[in-house]
Each structure stands twice: as C-alpha cells, then as structure tokens.
Image (spheres, rainbow, N blue to C red):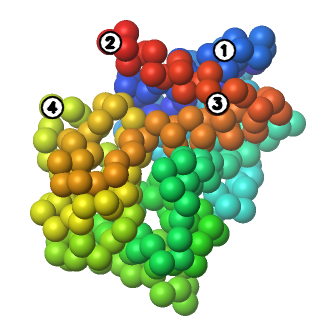
Amino acid sequence: MKHFAVIGNPIAHSLSPIMHQAAIQDLQLDAIYTRKKLSKESFDQEITDLLLSDLDGFNVTIPFKERILPYLDEVDSFAKKCGAVNTVVRRQNKWIGYNTDGRGFLEGLTEKRPLKDSDHVLIIGAGGASKGIYLALKEAYNGEVTVANRTLSKAEEMLEPRSKDRAITLTEAANKLSQFTIIIQTTAVGLNPENSDLPLALDLLSPGTLVSDIIYNPFETHFLQEAKKRGAITQNGLAMFVNQGALAFKLWTGENPNRAVMRQAVLDSFEEE
C-alpha cells in the first residue's frame, strides 16, 4: 500500500486527506493519505525521521515549504526558482521536491477570467506560496506584478531580475489599491476565523477588482467578505487547493485524478461541519 501525507504546523485544519482520499477511492488505488504535524522547534529531527519512514510522497504546507529544501536529494527547477517546495516524491530512494502551488493557482484564477497583459496584479505576502504564484504569473502573461509585504526586502528578493515589477510596503499598497485589477492574498492572515484582522486596508478597492485569497478553510475569509462588500469579484483558495493537489497526485501516482471528485469532497466536508 502506498502512503502519502501532508506535513505542516498547524495542520488540523487541512482538508488534504479528505480530498486525496476521494481521488484515491475514485481511482481504486491501494493507498492512504494522512496528516502529520511537525514541531517548528524540532523540525530538523522530525523531518529526518519522516524521510526514513515508509512514506511514498507528501505535501508541505505552512511553515515548512522553505525549510524542507536542504533535506531533499533533488529539487525541480521551478521549485528551486521558487525557493519553496509543496510536493515531495520518493523515486528510487531519492526525495525530489516540486512546487505545484503557482501553476495550481493560475489554473484556478483563469476559471474566473483570463489574464490580460493590461492587468495590474498585486500579490500580498512574500512567503513560500507567493513566490510560486509570482513565477507562474510571469510565465503566463506580460503584465506588471507588484508584491507587497510587511518586510520590504523579502518582497524585493522575490522579483525577477530586470523585470518591471515592483516591491512595496503594505501601507503603500493600501494607498494605491485602486490601481490594481487583480489582488492575490497569500499570507496566513485569515486562517483563524475568530480573528478579523486584514493584511491591509481595503478602503480604496475598486469595484470589479478580482480579489483572491489562497486560504480555503475558512471557506470565506474576513478579507474576502470585506472585498465583496466593496463590489469585488472574489475567489477563495479552493480552486488552487484542488488544482495543486491534482498536480501533486499525478507526480506521486502517474494518474490524473478527477478534479470534480476532489472538489466535491472538500465541499461536502464543509457542509458536514
């Protein structure tokens, strides 16, 4: 039996096991998918033990997408460019890292509407997922991308050399919000539904702006609720979650899972709560 998992901290909120088990069952594969919480303080020892276990592959989520890199035998060129890995595959006793976040996000975004070179895109945050999204955007269109982050230097490090893209502070982004046609929220702000904090103020948001939050649980973050009140077209992280998961599933098994089945499993889990 194949054994796949997702690692992170926190991890209890992850619906990856529900989604991947649905795909496994649909394809009648001899496999299981579990979740594993790793300690931030003891990560070095725990990840070493994990890589010596019987796992065949795993997903990586917050906050280990960058910390996992030194422990892998090989890293795919796109993931290396991202500086972050969200999917790990065991092949011939070697652990190989990939990043399906960016391409998964892009596939989901185009479900709302196609990207246009005239779009002005704002990415909020400069963590593990944001770099993959940024690079996938750069592959897909020639428009301008702005990255806003609490630590400006980290946003600057994300940008492609010699690009026309910009790094700005969160305050500056809030003051220029009306200039953007697509806004992508990639930070962990919003994971706790009891916390009403926003990554930045939305007072200057233009109606009709496409606003995406890569968080899928809770289903609608406070950020998306506030954006919707201001006339934005909103999208939560479900499309990205399903698409990146399907790309990871193919890397592990060689099979193309039914994305509609994966999506419905996630939606059903929300209805059961």
With respect to residue 158, does 61 lie above or below?
Answer: above
Q: Give the residue displayed 62% in from the left and 16% down from the top.
A: 22
Residue holding disc 2: 273
What's under tag 4, amino acid-wise? Answer: Glu
Circle nearer the viewer, 3 or 4? 3
Q: Are marks 3 and 4 in contact (CB under 8 Å)?
A: no
With respect to residue 25, does 230 lie above or below?
Answer: below
Circle nearer the viewer, 2 or 3? 3
Marks 3 and 4 sit apart, C-alpha to C-alpha, by 30 Å
What's under tag 2, amino acid-wise? Answer: Glu
Residue holding disc 1: 32
Residue holding disc 3: 259
What's under tag 1, amino acid-wise? Answer: Ile
> Which image quarter is the N terminus in?
top right
Closer to the N terminus: mark 2 or mark 1?
1
Marks 4 and 1 sit apart, C-alpha to C-alpha, by 32 Å
Circle nearer the viewer, 4 or 2? 2
Marks 2 and 3 sit apart, C-alpha to C-alpha, by 22 Å
Q: Give the residue displayed 15% in from the left and 38% down from the top.
A: 195
Residue holding disc 4: 194
Residue in the foreground of this view, choosing between 39 and 81: 81
What's under tag 3, amino acid-wise? Answer: Arg
